[in-house]
């Protein structure tokens, strides 16, 4: 991994134009931090090297260099070197708190959509609540056909192929009626990882084949309103499975970006047909029958085109706004809208991670944030599945900020009570947690790095992300929210997306603070006594197997 950190630095250096010393210095220190974790990593089992052999990485395809343009002076503007920066008013951001609120908002937004509905998720469930969502889509599509003139409403749904095809009644069978009734308006794309192919694809049974790689992005947009979340389209996520959700209202540039991103992934995915068959778009390389390297290069190119085109558009917009304000006149966008928009006090950065395609932006940004967190800064990090990458663990243990890490207790783990081998996964997470806690104690870092377990009767826990509090501040100025879990799968196997939200607005900072507090209030602090409880007993076979399989869940 130390070599990987150095390689990451070399790859990023190639992205940066000469003179970009600030970000170059940050990334140089990131490489140093990763290298200093080498001794701790050497003590871990070499069995961890076996899992990636099943899915060897494709060569990274480099991106074009980036350039800065005039922007606000907030300290995280370096993220804009890698991704587009969207400046908005904090009044357009709403933080949701409950599954029920999330579900009701989905229905309201679907019913009010006029131009586009774009939904990306791991899967769509098959229960009554999910059927109600499909009924809302059907009703909205019917209404669009009854309006005067040709309908302009388009519905695009992106799911994972393996998860969406599980069982006889599945995501595909739920959506086929929409394809049959509205063939010109509805598109359903099913992403199939290029790493599941050949003999491996034939031998691995249903459910287990999902461990190789998934479409894991969760974004739901309706016209110019965007919901970012870690929640899937399933009844548990609408009732008693706690996650995170943020609504970005009246944000056309952000909605355009995620529409184009979902379209790009959809173009390299299998297209669901009205007879429940699937086929690739004409001329597209097949993900598991065609040449793997060629497929991954095409996918990389399509996704990076979206990112770079959005960066270019936003830089032009920033330049217009900057020069217009210098000369005392409104920008072109303000002139066309007929009103002066308020100066942005909040910035949205989309962070994409698609390691199978050689795209590692989210990993780069997350590692840099952890590296540069100053002494007395506080980072609240939460994940439903505590299985951090070695690089993230090394940075947490080797940097200066205080960490409060929220994870699922065994009873609120999504695999608790599962049948077969999956039923042992909560015990595997306990074992991973205990190992990390022991390392924290061995380094005498218990006060600086604290683990807390979410526990709520009748609920499961799926929230993920982080909140960053600068030294001396009682409110967060940055949050990450989206699909990544900070684990090996999120970094290396799956397609992931989240956003960094940076804000100077106290009211929005207060919303984010309350969201964090509400989640952490349902938790207890982990101590040595935690692992002495009878329900924390981990069988020997689980301890032996966990190092072999931890990179798959």
Image (cartoon, helix red, strand yellow):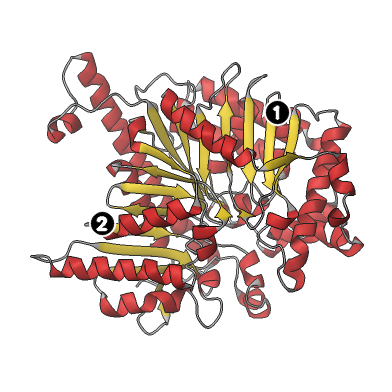
Residue drawn at x 70%, y 33% as measured from the top left: 395
Q: Residues within 10 Å of mark 2 (few under 14, many from 20)?
A: many
Instruction: Name the image quarter holding residue 389.
Output: top right
Which x, y percent locates residue 250? 28, 42
Residue 201 at least partly seen: yes
Residue drawn at x 48%, y 73% as measured from the top left: 126
| Secondary-structure class at tag 2 | loop
Q: Is residue 14 above or below residue 321?
A: below
- Determine whether, in the image, residue 399 is placed left or right of residue 164: right
- Determine whether, in the image, residue 56 is placed left or right of residue 109: right
Residue drawn at x 47%, y 67% as measured from the top left: 124
- Determine whether, in the image, residue 234 is placed left or right of residue 117: right
Q: Which residue is mark 1?
A: 32
Frontmost residue, 189 versus 378: 378
Q: Is residue 363 above or below residue 461?
A: above
Q: Is residue 297 above or below residue 32?
A: below
Residue drawn at x 48%, y 57% as measured from the top left: 297
Residue with the most extreme front position: 457
Label number found at residue 329: none
Which x, y percent locates residue 187? 33, 68
Which x, y percent locates residue 155? 30, 64
Q: Quadrant of the C terminus?
A: bottom right
Instruction: Name the image quarter holding residue 175.
Output: bottom left
Residue 294 at least partly seen: no
């Amino acid at each position: 991994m130390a070599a990987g950190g150095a390689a990451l630095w070399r790859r990023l250096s190639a992205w940066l134009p000469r003179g970009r010393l600030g970000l170059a210095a940050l990334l140089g220190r990131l490489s140093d931090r990763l290298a200093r974790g080498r001794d701790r990593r050497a003590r871990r089992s070499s069995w961890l090297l076996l899992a990636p052999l099943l899915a060897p990485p494709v060569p990274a395809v480099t991106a074009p260099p980036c350039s800065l343009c005039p922007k606000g002076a907030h300290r995280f503007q370096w993220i804009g070197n890698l991704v587009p920066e969207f400046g908005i008013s904090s009044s357009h951001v709403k933080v949701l708190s409950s599954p029920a609120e999330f579900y009701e908002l989905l229905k309201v937004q679907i019913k009010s959509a006029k131009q586009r509905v774009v939904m990306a998720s791991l899967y769509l469930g098959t229960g009554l609540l999910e059927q109600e969502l499909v009924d809302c889509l059907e009703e909205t599509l019917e209404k669009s056909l009854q309006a005067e003139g040709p309908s302009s409403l388009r519905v695009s749904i992106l799911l994972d192929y393996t998860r969406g095809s599980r069982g006889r009644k599945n995501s595909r069978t739920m959506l086929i009626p929409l394809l049959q009734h509205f063939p010109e308006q509805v598109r359903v794309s099913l992403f199939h990882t290029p790493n599941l192919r050949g003999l491996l694809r034939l031998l691995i049974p249903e459910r287990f084949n999902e461990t190789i790689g998934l479409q894991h992005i969760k974004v739901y947009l309706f016209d110019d309103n965007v919901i970012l979340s870690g929640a899937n389209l399933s009844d548990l996520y609408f009732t008693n499975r706690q996650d995170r959700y943020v609504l970005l209202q009246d944000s056309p540039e952000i909605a355009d970006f995620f529409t184009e991103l979902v379209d790009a992934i959809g173009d390299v995915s299998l297209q669901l047909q009205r007879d429940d068959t699937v086929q690739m778009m004409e001329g597209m390389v097949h993900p598991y029958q065609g040449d793997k390297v060629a497929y991954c290069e095409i996918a990389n190119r399509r996704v990076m085109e979206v990112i770079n085109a959005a960066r270019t558009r936003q830089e032009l917009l920033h330049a217009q706004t900057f020069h217009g304000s210098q000369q005392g006149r409104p920008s072109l966008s303000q002139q066309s809208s007929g009103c002066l928009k308020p100066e942005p006090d909040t910035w949205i950065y989309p962070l994409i991670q698609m390691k199978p395609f050689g795209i590692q932006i989210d990993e780069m940004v997350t590692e840099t944030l952890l590296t540069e967190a100053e002494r007395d800064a506080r980072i609240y990090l939460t994940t439903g599945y505590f299985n951090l990458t070695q690089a993230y663990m090394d940075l947490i243990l080797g940097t200066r900020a205080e960490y409060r890490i929220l994870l699922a207790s065994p009873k609120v783990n999504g695999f608790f009570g599962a049948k077969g081998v999956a039923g042992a996964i909560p015990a595997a997470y306990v074992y991973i947690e205990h190992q990390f806690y022991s390392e924290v104690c061995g380094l005498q870092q218990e006060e600086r790095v604290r683990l807390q377990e979410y526990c709520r009767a009748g609920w499961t826990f799926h929230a993920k992300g982080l909140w960053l509090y600068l030294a001396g501040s009682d409110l967060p100025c940055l949050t990450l929210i989206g699909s990544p879990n900070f684990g090996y799968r999120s970094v290396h196997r799956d397609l992931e997306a989240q956003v960094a939200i940076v804000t100077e607005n106290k009211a929005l900072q207060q919303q984010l603070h309350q969201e964090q507090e509400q989640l952490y209030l349902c938790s207890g602090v982990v101590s040595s006594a935690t692992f002495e409880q009878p329900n924390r007993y981990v069988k020997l076979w689980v301890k032996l197997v966990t190092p072999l399989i931890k990179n798959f869940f």
